[in-house]
């Protein structure tokens, strides 16, 4: 689609999808009962620990809402004990294959020949030697070493005393082959243990236990994929969705895949919601949505933000499901307890300061008009422009001087200008100062950034090339009438540009800001950010702007002498996320003293770069961008967040629990660095210790003054600074172009 069309259509589609009606009050949910939706922890906190393990169930009490229901998929053993296992094939979710290597069998399961290891071949005491393992192989296997024997249903109640238990029972016909009865077991266990919910995808099973279990136990009919046949009626689950009055005769609720409610297109964008929630409520049925997991692929409409997905099911102004079945119960706890019914019109430019990273670059190509407009709409306090210079001396907003990063130059007529410029980077590239502004704007298109593309996590692919490039002057004109506390201009490679291109970036930026009226606009502050102290020192001499020193290496702390140097030219410092919470193999190891040291010295601290994709986050943050933000704001005390996704950070600032202090719910307590490693993972399975990170020293900060711009005003780099600018250009071009094409093909 055209960029202009995207701007006007996307917001209206979101309003259509989420329902433009006024949100319900906090005490009036659009559930069948009018009460808050129920959180059901599938196998406990199975997004982190092996499903149905002791730590998975126990961690729910620490990290989730206190009324969270524990869910157990019941399987029967040879001696008629019901144990909690996420799959009927034990070799998928336990180490049984190594304990009983000769135990593989083949049985009919719902009429399908199935090979594996099955609980029906073992007594419960035999399984005491077997340990549960992570079912989803993309999740960390390090907890598997803790040895978790399967738990009986009675054990779950006795060990954890949850506010409720949900049993999912199925394959009654399978068990009958072994003179076992899931029906009889369920009736038996419900007399010994308080069971709040019993679900099954089998009509005959629910019908057979109706009236034989407590009338306080809710019977829930579980829907499988729409094309799958329900075994006792031989109807598809999709067709049975059209006859909810029949379902009401044997159940009080239904459990459906979330796609039944919010279907997605083939390219993974939301389609309009269905009427299934309203249909269920009209039939007098509660409706629960399944398949929630923070580390599964979400619709692109959610911008990799699982909290946004939950809110679309419970707080969209039109309907609310009665409960959610989830692998990560902390996130719906946040949604229901702190983020529903927010006053989204409340603009607060206080801490933490939300600073965009190349605009809303998580949703649109970086530094384009669409990315900046989205950042403003999403509530950024400060939007940023990393300035680069073109061949004809035009300052442009571009995340890198290398056009290979954010444009289609690899497939353009300018790709032959590939060169290695060691003062900027060691890899070959084509740089902004190789092309004029007209060359760029007329021949190139932007490309959205995809930092997690190796994990198959593309960003907003429908709009991969949407938006227009912006000059610094365009950016400054755009920001004039926006509700922002300020703007940030980032400047890099100023010494190279002065010496080799004869261009003074500092003076040119100062002039552009003056021409745009920023020297007479007290409502919006100007922030200048650079990794070069020489740049900030020159701004300090000539302006009164807020100066931000970016530390572009991982450090654990700063020496007093380095702090003294920084304070001579800056009032704030930007630090990498790993300088606050160092990590090894996606586990945080500890919290450094860096933030406290900088703040004690009187410097504000901004952390970069926050991203919503779970692949960018340590396991300690539960694949939840909100939990990550909470750790940096409440746990580390940073003053600002530099983020690709300003909407997620803005919503965090608005949440209903943000100012509750010690009264905040447990699920809003910030994750403590190193806790997962130190308190849970068996020591031999822990990742190796990190080498000590360095201290920031004064020698890292001090730089000679910026050189004056050379008298030759040509903006073409000299041969000495551009190694191989033309030599071997052909083979460099081929390699670079192939690399770019292969990377793009992997995202297709």
Image (cartoon, rainbow, N blue to C red):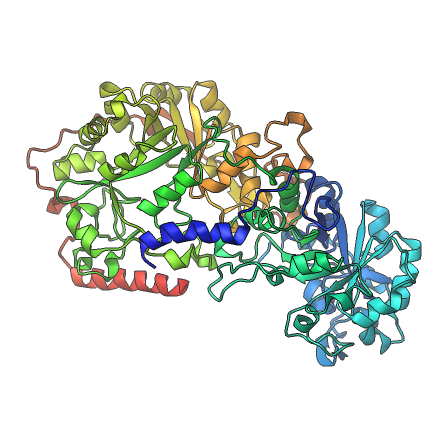
Numbered disc total? 0
Compared to residue 60, the image places residue 130 above or below, namely below
Q: Residue furthest left?
A: 712
Q: Residue 235 at what x, y percent from top left? A: 71, 77
Which is nearer the eye, 390 or 334?
334
The quadrant where residue 484 appears: top left
- The residue sitting at 34% across, 36% down in the picture is 384
Compared to residue 378, the image places residue 518 above or below, namely above
Q: Residue 253 at what x, y percent from top left? A: 76, 59
Which is nearer the eye, 10 or 641?
10
- The residue sitting at 13% across, 32% down in the picture is 709
Which is nearer the eye, 713 or 330?
330
Q: Residue 293 at what x, y percent from top left? A: 61, 54
The quadrant where residue 232 appears: bottom right
Which is nearer the eye, 598 or 435?
435
The quadrant of the rendering that contains the N terminus is: bottom left
**Residue 225 appears left or right of 733:** right
- The answer to whether residue 158 is seen in the rendering is yes
- The residue sitting at 43% across, 31% down in the picture is 606
**Residue 358 appears left or right of 245:** left
Q: Residue 463 at what x, y percent from top left? A: 37, 56
**Residue 688 appears left or right of 445:** right
**Residue 530 appears left or right of 194:** left
């Amino acid at each position: 689609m055209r960029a202009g069309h995207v701007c006007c259509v996307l917001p209206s589609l979101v309003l259509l999808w989420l329902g433009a009606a006024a949100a319900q009050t906090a005490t009036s949910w659009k559930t069948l009962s009018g009460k808050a939706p129920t959180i059901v922890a599938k196998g406990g906190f199975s997004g982190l620990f092996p499903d149905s393990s002791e730590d998975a169930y126990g961690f729910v009490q620490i990290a989730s809402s206190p009324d969270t229901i524990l869910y157990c998929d019941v399987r029967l053993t040879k001696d008629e004990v019901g144990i909690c296992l996420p799959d009927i094939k034990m070799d998928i979710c336990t180490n049984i294959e190594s304990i009983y290597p000769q135990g593989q069998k083949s049985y009919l399961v719902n009429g399908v020949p199935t090979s594996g290891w099955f609980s029906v071949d073992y007594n419960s005491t035999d399984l005491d030697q077997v340990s549960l393992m992570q079912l989803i192989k993309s999740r960390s296997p390090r907890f598997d070493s803790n040895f978790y024997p399967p738990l009986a249903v009675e054990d779950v109640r006795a060990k954890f005393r949850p506010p409720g238990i949900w049993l999912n029972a199925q394959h009654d016909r399978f068990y009958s082959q072994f003179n076992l009865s899931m029906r009889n077991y369920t009736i038996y266990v419900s007399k010994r243990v308080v069971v709040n919910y019993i679900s099954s995808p089998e009509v005959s099973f629910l019908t057979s236990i109706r009236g034989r279990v407590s009338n306080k136990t809710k019977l829930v009919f579980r829907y499988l994929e729409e094309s799958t046949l329900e075994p006792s009626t031989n109807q598809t689950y999709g067709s049975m969705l059209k006859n909810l009055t029949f379902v009401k005769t044997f159940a009080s609720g239904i459990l459906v895949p979330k796609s039944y409610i919010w279907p997605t297109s083939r390219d993974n964008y939301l389609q309009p919601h269905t009427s299934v929630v309203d249909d269920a409520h009209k039939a007098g049925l509660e409706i629960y949505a399944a398949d929630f997991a923070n580390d599964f692929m979400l619709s692109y409409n959610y911008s990799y933000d699982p909290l946004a997905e939950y809110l679309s099911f419970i707080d969209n102004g039109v309907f609310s499901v009665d409960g959610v079945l989830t692998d990560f119960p902390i996130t719906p706890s946040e949604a229901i307890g702190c983020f529903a019914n927010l006053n989204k019109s409340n603009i607060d430019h206080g801490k933490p300061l939300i600073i965009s990273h190349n605009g809303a670059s998580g949703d649109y190509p970086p530094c384009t008009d669409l990315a900046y407009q989205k950042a403003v709409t999403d509530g950024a306090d400060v939007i940023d422009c990393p300035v680069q210079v073109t061949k004809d001396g035009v300052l442009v907003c571009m995340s890198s001087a290398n056009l290979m990063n954010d444009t289609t130059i690899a497939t353009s007529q300018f790709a032959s200008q590939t060169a290695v410029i060691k003062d900027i980077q060691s890899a070959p590239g084509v740089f902004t100062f190789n092309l004029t502004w007209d060359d760029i704007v007329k021949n190139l298109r932007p490309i959205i950034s995809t930092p997690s593309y190796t994990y198959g996590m593309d960003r907003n692919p429908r709009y991969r090339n949407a938006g227009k490039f912006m000059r610094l002057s365009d950016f400054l004109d755009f920001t004039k009438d926006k509700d922002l506390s300020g703007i940030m201009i980032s400047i890099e490679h100023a010494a190279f540009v002065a010496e080799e291109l004869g261009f003074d970036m500092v003076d040119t930026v100062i002039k552009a800001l003056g021409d745009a009226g920023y020297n007479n606009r007290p409502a919006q502050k100007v922030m200048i950010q650079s990794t070069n102290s020489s740049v900030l020192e020159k701004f300090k001499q000539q302006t009164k702007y807020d100066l931000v020193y970016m530390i572009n290496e991982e450090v654990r702390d700063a020496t007093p002498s380095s702090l003294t140097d920084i304070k001579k030219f800056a009032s704030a410092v930007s630090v990498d996320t790993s300088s606050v919470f160092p990590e090894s193999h996606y586990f945080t190891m500890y919290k450094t003293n860096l933030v406290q040291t900088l703040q004690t010295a009187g410097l504000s601290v901004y952390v970069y770069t926050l991203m919503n994709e779970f692949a960018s986050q340590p396991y300690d943050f539960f694949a939840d961008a909100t939990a990550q933000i909470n750790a940096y704001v409440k746990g580390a005390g940073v003053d600002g967040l530099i983020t690709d996704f300003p909407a997620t950070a803005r919503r965090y600032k608005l949440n209903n629990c943000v100012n509750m202090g010690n009264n905040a719910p447990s699920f809003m307590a910030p994750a403590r660095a190193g806790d997962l490693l130190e308190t849970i993972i068996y020591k031999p399975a822990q990742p190796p210790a990190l080498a000590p990170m360095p201290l920031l020293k004064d020698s890292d900060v001090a730089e000679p003054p910026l050189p004056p711009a050379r008298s030759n005003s040509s903006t073409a780099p000299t041969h000495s600074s551009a190694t191989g600018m033309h030599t071997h250009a052909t083979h460099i071009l081929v390699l670079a172009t192939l690399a770019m094409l292969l990377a793009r093909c992997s995202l297709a």
